[in-house]
Image (cartoon, helix red, strand yellow):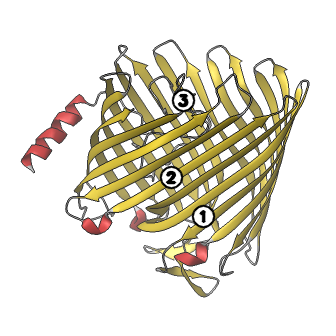
Amino acid sequence: MMKKILLAVLVAAGSIIFANHLAYAAEEEIFTPFYFPYTAESENWFQPFYHPLGPEKEKGQWFKPFISVREEYDDNIFLTRYGNEGDWITTIQPGFIIQTGSAKQKHKFILDYLADINLFADNNGENNNNHTLNTALQINLNKIRFDVVNMFHYFSERSGAEDVGRIDRTQDYIWPSITFNLNKLDLLIGYNYRMEDYRSDTTIGSFKGQTLTYEDLDRDEHEGTIETAWKLWPKTSLLCTFDYGKILHDTGKKSDSDYYDYLVGLRGEPSAKSTGEFRVGFRTQDYEDYGDDFESIVFDGSWIEKFSSRDFLRLDFKRTTYDTIFQDNAYYESTYTGADFRHDFTSKLYGNLGVSYQVNRYPTEATLDNLNDVRRKDDLWSTGVGVGYKFSKDITFDLKYQYRLRDSNFSTYDYRNNRISFGLRGHF
């Protein structure tokens, strides 16, 4: 144990700069745009992003296996306000990428798999195995393009911003779409299916006078999308998006809802140093048998600024609604902003600095912690620093530190958390 503590001290001393979201998938890539990063609540802040729409394969290579091994010390593994308990966590992440096609070819297929195995030194009951399988298919017929993306996630993680319990869950996301290329205008018609399955019957409280378990949060979401992209410049388009969605809960104890999104934004490369997508608009969401419907501004996007060959900044934004388990609320609105800065000191040594802020607001008044008829509001902060070193093209070592804080007007939900880690990852 003393050796591990000493090593942790050395890691802290050596962690110069880090981003709380590792948002690049390979050494040749800086970031994978438009793949929304983990929030301040997430445990997998260190996880590399191997996404179907990520980096192009190397010439002649269609199969790329990889693995990362990490050791982490977490000083508050249960995210409690008092009586913090720390533990060492060993994480092993094997996986692979299968790719066909290239940037210059019309048709592409990508499949990637990532296992996430977490082993706790003292609290073995917290051990968990997570699996992510992503696939993407693109068929390009010049004026018409077909895309199908599937993201499947079988995992055990924090179930939401208002709950810190580790709950087994299954998520599946399927997005087929067809795009018509009409000179300066692209027209996309798409369908989104999202499934959420909680593999737990633990009681979580009540809603509209009925006792709920996590299984009452199981849901299917169907969304239709029409989007036009008008090419203002050769590499930048003006976006206009309309979404209609319907959320259906399996047991009927939580309120189902219908929503409409009206969004405008930009996508592409507005300048030689800028890449991004950002949309802002308005959502109306009507809930069954629930008085506080949602009508407000929503937005989402990522923006990457390349200041020089060594300096990169990524900004992420998102505002939307989520299901909640908190006292007679059907949902909470969440607004997230994050910034990550990367600097390459040399061709082998790089550093990152990151910060994020998320605010969650609940529409229905509650009584708790000697507060009567108060709407809950949580402020979540996350910041981190770290440094990485590339021993070779395929082997990278990094050291990281992250601090997380949740400050709620109901003090029961407050916590502070420090995590320090070091790891090695490689491609083959």
The x and y percentages for residue 197 are: 57, 69
The x and y percentages for residue 293 are: 75, 66
The x and y percentages for residue 33 are: 60, 33
* Left or right position of 204 against 135: left
Question: Does residue 188 appear in this view?
Answer: yes
Element under disc 3: strand
* Type of amino acid under label 1: Tyr
* Type of amino acid under label 2: Thr
- Residue 314 is tagged as 3
* Left or right position of 386 against 326: left
- Residue 362 is tagged as 1
Q: Residue at x 40, y 52 (%)?
A: 116
What residue is disc 2 on? 132
What is the number of callouts on the image? 3
Quadrant location of the C terminus? top left
- Foreground: 305 or 225? 225
Q: Residue at x 50, y 52 (%)?
A: 132
Does the residue at mark 3 contact the one at mark 1 (Cβ under 8 Å)?
no
Q: Is residue 13 above or below residue 165?
A: above
Element under disc 1: loop
* Left or right position of 227 against 290: right
Q: Residue at x 75, y 42 (%)?
A: 147
Q: Nearer the viewer, mark 1 or mark 2?
A: 2
* Type of amino acid under label 3: Arg
Residue extending farthest right: 182
N-term-proximal mark, 1 vs 2: 2
Q: CA distance from mark 3 to mark 1?
A: 29 Å
